[in-house]
Amino acid sequence: MNCALGMAVTQFPPCFTLNTPKVRLFTVNCQSVSPAASGMSSTGLVEKPWKVSDARLVLEDGSVWRAKSFGASGTQVGEVVFNTSLTGYQEILTDPSYAGQFVLMTNPHIGNTGVNFDDEESKQCFLAGLVIRSLSISTSNWRCTETLGEYLASRNIMGIYDVDTRAITRRLREDGSLIGVLSTEESKTDDELLKVSRTWDIVGVDLISGVTCKAPYEWVDRTGSEWEFNLNGRNEETFQVVAYDFGIKHNILRRLASYGCKITVVPSTWPASETLKMKPDGVLFSNGPGDPSAVPYAVEAVKEIIGKVPVFGICMGHQLLGQALGGKTFKMKFGHHGGNHPVRNIRNGRVEISAQNHNYAVDPESLPEGVEVTHVNLNDGSCAGLAFPQQKLMSLQYHPEASPGPHDSDLVFGEFIELMKQERQRT
Amino acid sequence: MSHSVHQCNNALCKFIQTNRYLPAARPFPLHFQQRRLASKRNGKSIHYSSRPLILNSAKSQNERGDVKNSGNLSNGGAFSTQNLGKRTDIKKILILGAGPIVIGQACEFDYSGTQACKALREEGYEVILINSNPATIMTDPEMADRTYIEPMTPELVEQVLEKERPDALLPTMGGQTALNLAVALAESGALEKYGVELIGAKLDAIKKAEDRDLFKQAMKNIGLKTPPSGIGTTLEECIEIANSIGEFPLIIRPAFTLGGTGGGIAYNREEFEAICKSGLAASVTSQVLVEKSLLGWKEYELEVMRDLADNVVIICSIENIDPMGVHTGDSITVAPAQTLTDKEYQRLRDYSIAIIREIGVECGGSNVQFAVNPEDGEVMVIEMNPRVSRSSALASKATGFPIAKMAAKLSVGYSLDQIPNDITKKTPASFEPSIDYVVTKIPRFAFEKFPGSEPILTTQMKSVGESMAVGRTFQESFQKAVRSLECGYSGWGCAKVKELDWDWEQLKYSLRVPSPDRMHSIYAAMKRGMKVDDIHELSYVDKWFLTQLKELVDVEQYLFAWNLSQLTKDDFWEVKRRGFSDKQIAFATKSTEKEVRSKRLSLGVKPVYKRVDTCAAEFEADTPYMYSSYEFECESAPTNRKKVLILGGGPNRIGQGIEFDYCCCHTSFALQDAGYETIMMNSNPETVSTDYDTSDRLYFEPLTVEDVLNIIDLEGPDGIIVQFGGQTPLKLSLPIQQYLDEWKPKCRSGSGLVRIWGTSPDSIDAAEDRERFNAILTELQIEQPKGGIAKSEKDALAIAADIGYPVVVRPSYVLGGRAMEIVYSDEKLVTYLETAVEVDPERPVLIDKYLSDAIEIDIDALADSHGNVVIGGIMEHIEQAGVHSGDSACMLPTKTVSSSCLETIRSWTTKLAKRLNVCGLMNCQYAITASGDVFLLEANPRASRTVPFVSKAIGHPLAKYAALVMSGKSLHDLQFTKEVIPAHVSVKEAVLPFEKFQGADVLLGPEMRSTGEVMGIHSESSIAFAKAQIAAGQKPPLSGTLFLSLNDLTKPHLASIARAFLGVGFRLIATSGTAHVLELEGLPVERVLKMHEGRPHAGDMIANGQIQMMVVTSSGDQLDQIDGRKLRRMALAYKIPIITTVAGALATAEAIRSLKSSKIEMTALQDYFSSEKATKSTKTLQSVSYT
């Protein structure tokens, strides 16, 4: 505990020892409420045309942010991360990788396009809550079927708006990710909430078990023709792929299907031996929430599979591959969350603009001989992709499936197909 | 290691040290560092390694001990054979500017050209610049190695190529002018002849993007839809296309024009034919596109950048609030796009990338426009500009990403990842900016200046300027943008708008038909209870924006229900967060702005300032580029240095444009050099002043009392400079002074109180206030034309009777001669008082004797606080007094003015400057009558429109001197103690936008209507004048037929004009009256019928190309209204030079004579001044010889 003191720590040293990590504490008391507009006060001649503050966000650095609530009400604890994507809040809400986190959108206007059926990335919202600057008072989009407020309320997710999201973002940038507590309960004091925030930690928590599917299932849907953007280099051949669901985004599956894969999605705890029995052409390790070190069983499964069939890791999958190869992962200061990160594809020299969402990274220094760093994040030089040709292994730290985000890295799915094709030809 | 904060800190430290991609302790710049080294290493050798640099980098990483790249480089090897990184095979680059400011091409190209010059010189290239516009920063002699303020015709630019022998030509920074010029030079073979390479955009790419047919084909190739359309080169073809599309409305777009000149929307056949005709005439290639109208579709723009390594990024998405049908330059636009989901946005992104690749724009910025059907999301591509555009200037200012600078660097071989992001410094430029605020741009129009033209917005751009505002929400930025416009509104709503009194039919019409005031119609409709859905049905404005606006009306309603004293802190907070100004709150609560301010401050409701950082706060910003908002945290971090706040000019308008921005920038440069921190405040996205690296700090804010006082409170500057931004800051000077007197705020630097620098607001007021001014002139015995101040109609008629007609009438406090008129009778005077005076009801009307046939003189003088006055320059107007000085051509030094008159002018100016205690610049206008009497017409103790012109003509930066003088330096300190009378002659000519305003007359008058200016320099005055004419697009023909039609007032000069033109070999034709006079003089003339007299008439001759030039004057009588105006419009349509003044005609004849006898030579500005630069130019010549 004698390592460098962060700002947050120096401000509140007394509470620091109360920290009891690895406890997943959810004090959720959620119930559906009517949308934001109902909060008008009815005193006076004219009703205030705005809602009055009814929620607080208390961060572990001791700051308390007054806000207005929407979606569910209650009290919720989680890690606050910011996302700089300008579009795609619905995809972010349904990305299981955000389990246990409050997502703060830096784009001030959220909810403008409502929500629709097509843009779901999973069956549920797993995130702890949404923090935004301005909740749209109306929606405008031909695909919209529901407002964001209604959607979050029905899914029991808390949201707050009218907070200085930029100020919080700057704190996160300076201090790293912070634990926060969101509450609409007036009865709880700031100190109580602060205490909750300081007794909760996301490091080492197995969040994957909460988001993975319960049983294997087949996936066949391709990217809808209306949204298909890459019709080149399609294969006639079909490849059987087993996808480990650590919180998989549907678009990974859609992209694989578009490239000609038949996919079986399996739960995170699916034994490697079972996978190999299915004789797949390739195995995909998906994205997922939290700390890769918290799921040693997954690392074991990965270890058993690599070298036997072509494998492809995305995000959490990449970190698991890194660990399985003997490398180390570590928690980054505030991670990468956004749709604008430049990544150099070292193999062809191109810069790809990428969608990123991770708090942990693989330390390339710790990887064994023969493992090649194929992609580098140009903003901070961190490792964004690996390959180990001898082991028929490739992985990306970020999200080639986009959704939300740019499609620049889509071709990597083609490379995975190529890897499987080569393997097929060899055997 | 249980606490996350600890862990991550540690991890990051370790991470940075161990990352092999980064040199220790420098978080990012390895790639460009390496690249820079590489280019230096290669700097001397001409043969650059053919190995792709990417591989070089991979290799050098290997050399550093990285072994993990060895795996699979085979892909990389096949990737490219291009050299990436700075090119060393080119040394000298020619940049084409955009020429004069016209509608559709404004000072955004000064901004882009300036950035390009800076960027390329920073890289060590020799830069040659051609631009005929003297009011630009880029034509400052120190911006380029060689600066040609010369006409931009292909022939003359070719001369420059021959003389300078540049290695490359960069055509993408100067708008459509530069692009068209580059195409002409490429096609004529000039580029090949002199071995000049086009960089930035190749000929093929330019043609593919600009040629409608090729563009449609290119879009088809990549599977993208364009609106059903066809290309016609004749009217018949156009009609055929219209028939095949089958329904109106149709859009007509001419090829190769700027701002959609000559285009429009046709709702019926008659309109269709008329627009096609003007479109065919406007197009360089006589090509128009007839297109199905996508009226009501949503319109989006994406700014794309690509480098030579084929990396593509999107800088910004822009959504137009005005849907399809209104030119994007005339639309209210918002960034980022607000109503697209990620799938839809990514689809547009993919399309944009595919388009820039298909068109083949190798590197640099482009702008792609899309239409999206709001019903089902169908996307169509509208157009793409393969160059830096007005939208890219907006996108640059909106995101902080300097598109033009990057485009310049990319054009010389850099790739995006080799250039650091200017704002963060730590991350590379190859990323896509993320923004955490909303930007709104609102165009500003000048229809009131062009009577006869209808204020309707179509696909042809008509706006003359724009304001941009940044806020955390749409509401905030929209309100700020409205009050930045300075059109008399302090925000949206909370005001008496005229539309509130309209009947429903009129209101509905104004919602349906886009006009500059449509947003106020929306307000009136909402206020009167019309539903958002219904407004959407009529206007097609997206409901998302309408509901946002509706909420503002609700808040206004709430405010109306309370008194100021009842408003709580919470109320203030919520209202201010929605962008309402103090003035609006005052209107709603029936109090004063001052009361609102003190109440607000007493409640502790103050704005904070957030930074524009390209990355939504993800990384630290290096550049203080800020906007206000009502939020929790303020990031401004003002310093305690000695500093100056410079107030800019706000949106461009006729009469207040780039010249004032030039002055503001110079002030900033000069004071920075003098050791001050400079703080710029402005709201105009097109300008150099709003570039984040022009001043030490930039506040992108409306220029209103409230916003300026907020910044004064925050920054505590030593000085505030109001003299350089035109009327906008001058209007603020009195209230600012009152505030300073009342509150006595202290400077942060600790050197006393905040002060307004330069001439005191009181002196400024003394010069503007007619009564005070008259008293001063009497005291100094300075003559002025007889006149008086009328506060009623009776007064006015009495004064007119006393001094005699014609009289000049105008409201006091005018800008650009707004509402100024020359009146010849009582009847007209009454009409004027009834229609025009409402312009400013608080101020009386000024009535002065109009001096017929007088010569007008403009003078700029500089005075210091020690009482020294130096004349900057005396300009003689070529047009007679009565034509607004901004519209008149002028000459420096004077040519026909006697030395005694000049002495009078000098002594009066000096006297007046001393009497008014001018500190800084002063501009005066004089009239000299035929008898040699001198009268002072006007005096303005501030920077004038002519400052940049004079500075360039005499080779001294007057605005910089003025800034230093205001900081306390004396003219002796600056070693500027004597009037400079150059040996060469400089002519300034105005450029007028008549072709954009159908139905407006082209005559010059006391109301200023020019949008820009050009300069011609030569040792001989007639050639200088000819150069200015050519640069202004009025190339005088050297022979042919001259059509003469003079009114009675100017008939006495008819013979001399006729003789002058006969002398240079012209044939004369004239209508009966004029011809009769000439015949009496015994001059050969052919008669032609007036238009109402039957056919064939003068109009037919114009149409048949039988007339090469016209001299037409007008007194505005009834007959002329019908005939003359039509003729003048025709001349405009057929691009026949038309001269409307006697002096102009005589000067033109002389210019033609000179042009016939001698060739126009192109001379760089640097060659006109000082011998030390002469050595430099010989050096230049030596380095040329090896190519």
Image (tube, grey):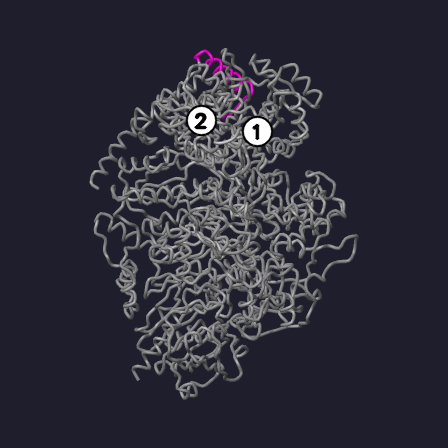
Q: Which residue is at a point 42% across and 87% down the rendered structure image?
A: A278
Crowding at dot 2, Cα within 10 Å, few <14 / some 14-19 / many 20+, comes out as: many
Tell me the element at label 2. strand
Q: In the rendered image of this protein, does residue B362 appear above or below residue B14?
A: above
- The quarter in which the C terminus of chain B is drawn is top left
Span of residues in magenta: B898-922
Whether residue B960 sits left or right of residue A49 in the image: it is: left
Q: Main secondary structure of the magenta part?
A: helix
Camera-side residue: B629 or B929? B929
Disc 2: which residue? B1043
The chain letter for the residue carrying disc 2 is: B
Image mark 1: chain: B
Tell me the residue that label 1 is attached to: B1121
Q: In the visual, does B535 lie left or right of B193?
A: right
Q: Is residue A138 left or right of residue B222?
A: right
Q: Are marks 2 and 1 in contact (CB under 8 Å)?
A: no
Distance (Cα) linking label 2 and label 1: 18 Å
Label placed on residue B636: none
State which quadrant residue B714 falls in. top right
Q: Quadrant of residue A257?
A: bottom left
Image location (x, y in percent) of residue A289: 50, 72
The picture quadrant where one finds residue B545 is bottom right
Residue closest to the eye, B130 or B54? B130
**Three-letter code, disc 2:** Phe
User: Where does residue B381 sit, x and y in percent of width and height?
Assistant: 47, 57
Residue B809 coordinates in the image, percent (x, y): 61, 23
